[in-house]
Amino acid sequence: MTHQWLTALPCLAISGTKRKGRLAIEKCVWCNRSDGYLEEVTVEAPDRFGLNRGGKTMTAHPEHTSLVHNYYSLAARVAKRYVLVMVIAGVLALLGLIPLLMIDQQGGDIETWVKVIYGPLLLPVALLPVLLPFATPETVKWIGIRSSLLLVRLLGLGLLGAWAWWVLLMNSS
Ligand SMILES: [Zn+2]
């Protein structure tokens, strides 16, 4: 869930200024370039909540249309479960903070709690974006599918690194 907020932030900042009075330039939804011949592709594109909103028509280079189809057929298959897992993991991560803070305050065994319960609980939040790097529809529109896959994967790897550093390398003090 976190990565989706993060990737949506720059778009929110830009969408306000970019839309005003400018003609929308057709570009390839995969590589984000507007040069060359572009053809229309209709795909079943899930929205940010993972719900199917029916067919959406976009433009892509002929050599990129099969990649666009592959991306959206995977997205349509897993989107609902993906969003559900991220929401549940996010809520559990927040709930898990309560006992974490309580144990910390009482000077208890925080290392065991983190390594055995809280750490594994946080893992899906970091791992899912690496395995299935879906960005929000706004991000895809802004930078294209190819760059959004890379961006989300990098953010996921960052989270995974932070997770490993915190959970696996934690020392009891
Ligand atoms: Zn393209």
Image: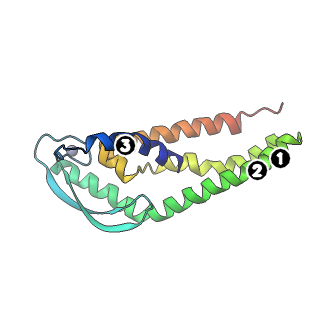
Amino acid on which disc 3 is placed: Cys
What is the residue that sits farthest to the left in this orientation? 37
**Number of numbered tags placed on the structure image:** 3
Secondary element at image label 3: helix
Amino acid on which disc 2 is placed: Ile
Res 105 visible? yes
**Quadrant housing residue 142:** top left
Residue 42 on image: x %, y %: 22, 62
Q: Is residue 137 left or right of residue 32?
A: right
Q: Which numbered disc covers residue 11?
A: 3
Q: Is residue 75 above or below residue 7?
A: below
**Quadrant housing residue 104:** top right
Mark 2 touching mark 1, by CB under 8 A? yes
Q: Is residue 30 left or right of residue 92?
A: left
Identity of the residue drawn at 33% across and 55% down: 71
Mark 2 highlights which residue? 98
Res 109 visible? no
Q: Residues within 10 Å of mark 1 (few under 14, many from 20)?
A: few
Residue 63 on image: x %, y %: 18, 48
Q: Earlier in the sequence, mark 3 or mark 1?
A: 3
